Amino acid sequence: MTDNQKSNSPNSPQLPVLSLVVAVAENGVIGNAGDLPWRMSGDLKRFKQLTMGHAMVMGRKTYDSIGRPLPGRVTIVLTKQRDYDPQHGEVRVAHSLEEATQQLVQTEMQQDQLFVVGGAEIYRLALPHAGRIYRTVVHATPEGDTRFAELDAHEWRVVEQTEYAADEKNEFACTWEVLERME
Ligand SMILES: NC(=O)c1ccc[n+]([C@@H]2O[C@H](COP(=O)([O-])OP(=O)(O)OC[C@H]3O[C@@H](n4cnc5c(N)ncnc54)[C@H](OP(=O)(O)O)[C@@H]3O)[C@@H](O)[C@H]2O)c1
């Protein structure tokens, strides 16, 4: 990670903004037994719209749970295993966030943002370098074994917020938010 990216400026001309995309319940839960703890197709649609045409970095465990590359995007799997084989030719492998950022440049994807899409270990790794967070607050308190870190209210401000009611396709009501790091 360069000093420039560490400054997290969403307007940096040279480096992509590291943007986290996360759905987090009111109790901090983001996952359970290797899967999402809810069925929210509206949120998956938002995820698709946000990430389409971009590269996404995900932890090896999250990639294992998805099991395939997502169309229209480049998947970069973060692993410590030097001989890791994702079993899909178009999926890329990186061993650090720096390496993932370097890989973005070699793709045809949009260069403005590199999306960090979980899970908890990878969010923890990326958060200090992130400039933006697309957060879905899921209004529920499900059981789970994987949690998102508490955000420091002095570091992040909410710049957009939209409420959605639960419906037949979305198990729980939620709030879609965009947060930006304060300068
Ligand atoms: N709600 C949401 O928005 C959301 C989003 C994504 C995932 N999830 C959930 O989160 C859970 C998975 O999260 P998780 O924390 O268990 O796993 P994860 O973050 O997906 O993956 C962890 C793996 O990433 C690799 N890794 C970790 N630190 C690394 C580093 N410094 N350098 C290189 N590679 C590194 C390691 O792979 P190796 O073991 O191969 O070395 C590690 O085992 C699942 O339940 C999933 O459904 C939720």
Image (cartoon, helix red, strand yellow):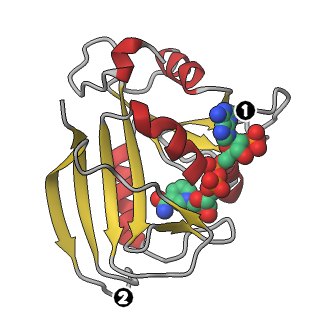
Tell me which corner region of the image, top left, top right, bottom left or bottom right, holds residue 113: top left
How many numbered badges does the structure rendering display?
A: 2
Residue at horizontal 82 percent and vertical 26 percent from the top: 82
| Residue named by callout 2 | 168
Above or below residue 151? Residue 141 is below
Residue 157: give x, y in percent of width and height.
Answer: 18, 47
Q: Is residue 22 left or right of residue 84?
A: left
Amino acid type indicated by mark 2: Glu
Which residue, as the protein is rendered here, is positioned at the far bottom? 168
Residue 107: give x, y in percent of width and height.
Answer: 50, 21
User: In this orientation, does residue 54 appear?
Assistant: no
Above or below residue 122? Residue 99 is above
Q: Is residue 106 left or right of residue 65?
A: left
Residue 46: give x, y in percent of width and height.
Answer: 33, 58
Residue 89 numbered mark, or none:
1
Q: Is residue 65 left or right of residue 157?
A: right
Choose between 175 and 74: the one closer to the eye: 175
Amino acid type indicated by mark 1: Gly
Residue at horizontal 41 percent and vertical 30 percent from the top: 129
Tell me which corner region of the image, top left, top right, bottom left or bottom right, holds residue 100: top right
Q: Earlier in the sequence, mark 1 or mark 2?
A: 1
Residue 90: give x, y in percent of width and height.
Answer: 66, 32
Residue 34 numbered mark, or none:
none
